[in-house]
Image (cartoon, rainbow, N blue to C red):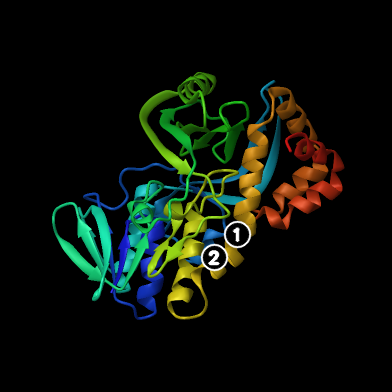
């Protein structure tokens, strides 16, 4: 039996892929319902269509085909992008759980993982309510502070950033446009759900409350409710598996740290894990081949931008206002910078000055 700890997209999608290959899979979710609480902006690029070709329309609340980037000096540029989906995150999670159940996965709610021990019969899993079970394989999909990772010795000096977001009434100029604000933490955003409500938030390491409230004031937000969470930074050196225990999603640090989205990467990692458990290669080799370079590049983008002064950010927005760079952005999805970063450097060599500046 394969025990998946965590009923978010990473866990249920991995379980779904494994069940379709004939594995007996059980998902243990600590909350009363799948899809709560929400700690995510819920925006996914069109690459999701390659993984979920028949996405129900009722779980999509909006589509985005334009991004506006604001510099600290309030100059900006707009760029058209391949259409992003803005999901109702609760409904997305519940849809993936339903797909998993239909494939034969058993989902058990209100089961909080405590620890596991290696015994003769397999991996002995104990839950906080005093119950236990035995599995041959454990998949840790239990978030950034993964207890599975801690118990397996796979946390490895993990670092985090803070994510703060509010659903709010906001004056919205264009429903199909996301606004990105540089100079608010690592960056801030306003993502429309409809004509009146947007998701306004920031990712940051320092001054999180101050920058968050500055952005709420900037966007004239009237808050409906708050969401927050910790986001892991990718560690290129860390292991994600050990003797029958595997990590995916936030638990593995499989996060695209340029934007700090993790849903798509977690689902891609889940596909690679299914291959590994079918004997088609080692999980470490498979996920690194699929995601490793782009995870590292996204981390480098994050660490580089975090060292920029406001003057640097103003210059960067000025450079990206050029049609030759906007064209490259508009023709590529941001998930895989390995496919377009070199094009940008060739078309605009002045971008190199920013990389050299922070070495």
Residue 203 locus on image (x, y percent): 52, 34
What secondary structure is found at the residue carrying circle 2?
A: helix
Q: In this view, does 190 lie above or below 331?
A: above
> Circle 1: is it few (<14), some (14-19), or many (20+) Cα within 10 Å?
some
**Which mark is on residue 287?**
2
Residue drawn at 14 percent across, 60 percent down: 131
Q: In which quadrant will I find the C terminus?
A: top right
Q: Is disc 1 in contact with disc 2, using a CB cutoff of under 8 Å? A: yes
Q: Is residue 163 above or below residue 337?
A: above
> Circle 2: is it few (<14), some (14-19), or many (20+) Cα within 10 Å?
many
**Which mark is on residue 292?**
1
Residue 108, quarter of the rendered image: bottom left
Q: Is residue 281 above or below residue 149?
A: below
Q: Using the numbered discs, state the Cα–Cα distance from disc 1 to disc 2 in whole angstroms.
A: 7 Å
Disc on the earlier residue, 1 or 2: 2
Residue placed farthest to the left in the image?
130
Horizontal relation, residue 349 to residue 309: left or right: right
Horizontal relation, residue 219 to residue 36: left or right: right
């Amino acid at each position: 039996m394969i025990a998946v700890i965590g009923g978010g997209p990473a866990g249920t999608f991995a379980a779904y892929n494994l069940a379709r290959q004939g594995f007996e899979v059980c998902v243990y979710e600590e909350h009363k319902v799948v899809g709560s609480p929400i700690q995510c902006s819920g925006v996914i690029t069109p690459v999701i269509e390659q993984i979920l070709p028949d996405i129900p329309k009722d779980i999509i609340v909006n589509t985005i085909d334009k991004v506006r980037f604001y510099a600290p000096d309030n100059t900006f540029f707009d760029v058209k992008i391949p259409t992003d989906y803005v999901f109702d995150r609760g409904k997305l999670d519940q849809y993936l759980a339903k797909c998993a159940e239909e494939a034969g996965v058993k989902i058990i709610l209100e089961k909080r993982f405590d620890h596991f021990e290696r015994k003769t019969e397999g991996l002995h899993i104990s839950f906080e309510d005093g119950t236990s079970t035995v599995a041959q394989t454990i998949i840790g999909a239990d978030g950034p502070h993964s207890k599975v990772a801690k118990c397996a010795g796979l946390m490895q000096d993990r670092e985090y950033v803070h994510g703060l977001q509010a659903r709010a009434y906001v004056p919205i100029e264009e429903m199909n446009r996301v606004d990105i604000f540089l100079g608010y933490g690592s960056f801030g955003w306003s993502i429309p759900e409809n004509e009146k409500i947007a998701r306004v938030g920031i990712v940051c390491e320092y001054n999180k409350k101050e920058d968050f409230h500055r952005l709420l004031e900037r966007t004239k937000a009237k808050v409906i409710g708050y969401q927050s969470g910790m986001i892991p930074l990718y560690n290129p050196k860390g292991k994600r598996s050990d003797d029958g225990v595997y990590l995916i999603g936030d638990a593995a640090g499989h996060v695209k740290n340029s934007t700090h989205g993790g849903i798509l990467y977690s689902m891609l990692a889940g596909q690679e894990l299914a291959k590994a458990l079918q004997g088609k290669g080692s999980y470490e080799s498979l996920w690194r081949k699929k995601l490793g370079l782009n995870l590292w590049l996204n981390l480098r983008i994050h660490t580089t931008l975090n060292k920029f002064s406001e003057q640097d950010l103003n210059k960067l927005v000025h450079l990206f206002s050029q049609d030759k760079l906007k064209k490259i952005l508009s023709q590529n999805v941001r998930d895989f910078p390995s496919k377009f970063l070199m094009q940008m450097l060739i078309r605009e060599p002045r971008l190199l000055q920013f990389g050299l500046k922070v070495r």
